Amino acid sequence: MNILILSGSPRKNGNTDLLVEAFAKGASEKHHVEVVSVHDYTVHPCMGCNACFSSEGNACVQKDDMPELSDSILTQYQLCLNFFHIEDAGHVLVRGAKEKGGVRGTKAMEEAEALGRAIAQ
């Protein structure tokens, strides 16, 4: 199994990192382990400006390292599939859908419909 550990402590080499190292050491005896420490990245908190809802690719106006970490949900999804030996029949990823019905008329709706057709065959 692949294990991704996200260490959220801002203090490098502190208690959290020690616990992460101990867990990784134990888990790596039988699994592939990768540790990502957020203290190695610059990540700013959301300002609530909602600019991402209208920018190309729903990019945040803040220039930090978050884009390197935002797609970890896809990694987690793939790890779950691998763990349960499930084949991915496809997925539709939607970013920036804020308001109810915000996905109407978007490429994501077309992708969802096409995926539904493909599965029905």
Image (cartoon, rainbow, N blue to C red):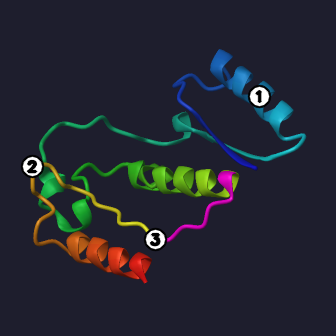
Most frequent secondary structure within the magenta stretch: loop
Dot 2: element = loop
Give the CA distance from mark 1 to mark 3: 33 Å
Question: Residue 24's spot in the image, x, y percent?
Answer: 77, 34
Which image quadrant is residue 78 in?
A: bottom right
Sooner in the amino-acid sequence: mark 1 or mark 3: 1
Question: Do residues under tags 3 and 2 come within 8 Å of each other at their CB atoms?
Answer: no
User: Which label lies toward us, 2 or 1?
Assistant: 2
Dot 3: element = loop
Question: Do residues under tags 2 and 1 come within 8 Å of each other at their CB atoms?
Answer: no
Residue at position x 27%, y 75% in the image = 113
Instruction: Identify the amino acid type marked 1.
Output: Phe
Crowding around mark 3 (Cα neighbors within 10 Å: few <14, some 14 to 19, many 20+) is few
Image position of 92 (left or right of 9)? left
Question: Do residues under tags 1 and 3 come within 8 Å of each other at their CB atoms?
Answer: no
The image's mark for residue 23 is 1
The residue to which callout 3 is attached is 90
The image's mark for residue 92 is none
What range is drawn magenta here?
A: 84-89
Question: Residue 112's spot in the image, x, y percent?
Answer: 29, 71
Residue at position x 76%, y 50% in the image = 1
Magenta span includes 15 = no
Give the CA distance from mark 3 to mark 2: 25 Å
The residue to which callout 2 is attached is 99
Image: 54 above or below 32: below
Image: 4 above or below 23: below
**Which is more toward the observer, 58 or 121?**
121
Give the CA distance from mark 2 to mark 1: 41 Å
Crowding around mark 1 (Cα neighbors within 10 Å: few <14, some 14 to 19, many 20+) is few
